[in-house]
Image: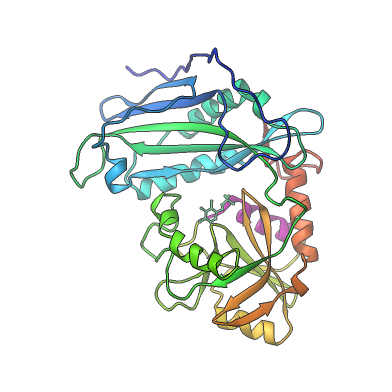
Amino acid sequence: MSSSTITIVKNANKKPKPQSKEIAFGRTFTDHMFVMDYEADKGWHEPRIVPYEPLTLDPAAMIFHYGQTVFEGMKAYRTEDDRILLFRPDQNIKRLNKSSERLSIPQVDEERVMEYLIELIRLEQDWVPDFEGTSLYIRPFIIGTEPSLAVAPSKTYKLMVILSPVGPYFKGGLKPVQINVEKQFTRAVKGGTGMAKTAGNYSSAYQAQAKAYEEGLADVLWLDGIEKRYIEEVGSMNIFFKIDGEVVTPALSGSILKGITRMSIIELLHKWDIPVTERKVSIDEIYQAYQDGKLEEVFGTGTAAVISPVGQLNWSGEKMDINNGEIGELSQKLYDTITGIQRGSVEDTENWTIEV
Ligand SMILES: *Cc1c(COP(=O)(O)O)cnc(C)c1O
């Protein structure tokens, strides 16, 4: 039968590690990667850590044709006293399975995958950079590998984990960005794949992104696909609004990705006794709040940036300036708390971190 014991093949040719915090996102990869295969009769089997290298796949491999794939994104952080922490990694593995379910990909054993992940990061621990604001980005993903053009789920899969040292998201501190409210394109619809981290959601967003860039704006605010009225996400982040002292974020409707940063922020706000509601939020409501002078803060949330303050929303030429284009007090406090927990400088009262 299949074995769950991991085999490790060490890389004899170690690459040089980044020497400063100027590390471009997702272009440098570590010396090793994790691989595990799936076949119907064996289940997930042959977990292994091997030298990072290109893959050989049949050109008919199903991933290339019908996009049967899911991914995750998380980070390992180095603390001041040289420990390595992961932030709620169990949630990422759980979400990987959720995404897989939507894409008809077989489930993984969450506890085992956690063990494999920790084993890989332990082996690559020298790759977790120690410059301010840097981290080791972790990218688990699954692809359908069966060579077949049949429109049906693949019978074989590969789960892989690759690691990439990354620099700070914001170069000179948190900087509010200008966002285009997208009226033509849709990211996801209820019943579709919006709640899954799957490739097609991202490549289908590029056209809207390009349009925003052309107008000198940083990203896109997505509205619901049916009425083009209710707010869903910002770029590939969840979104929060602070209106007249209350924090609101779009309720998970099926087309919104359930962010772990989003979840953590809601939990922190509850703990701090700051009113927070998950509900439908329309762009008209936001515009009204803006006109009434009650739109206090807007920010995106995700693993990459943690908090990305929005300084201006552009809605059909109506420019809503938020907090004079400056970062809000609550946005800053949430950012400092979460990054502090991730880097071990703020007490982790919620037991969110795991030491590698
Ligand atoms: C990954 C992702 C997020 C943020 O999720 P986190 O778990 O907080 O990193 C939000 N929206 C989309 C579309 C995403 O892909």
| The quarter of the displayed image where residue 247 is located | bottom right
Q: Nearer the viewer, residue 331 or 52?
A: 52
Relative side of 176 to 152, left or right: right
Q: Nearer the viewer, residue 123 or 107?
A: 123
From the viewer's perspective, is residue 274 above or below residue 353? below
| The quarter of the displayed image where residue 130 is located | top right
User: Which segment is the magenta one?
Assistant: 258-271
Q: How many marks?
A: 0
259 part of magenta stretch:
yes
Q: Is residue 255 visible?
A: yes
Quadrant where the N terminus lies? top left
Relative side of 24 to 230, left or right: right
Q: Give the percent coordinates (x, y) of residue 134.
A: 70, 39
From the viewer's perspective, is residue 351 above or below residue 176? above
51 part of magenta stretch:
no
Q: Residue at x 35, y 19 (%)?
A: 2
Q: Residue at x 26, y 30 (%)?
A: 40
Q: Give the percent coordinates (x, y) of residue 137.
A: 60, 38
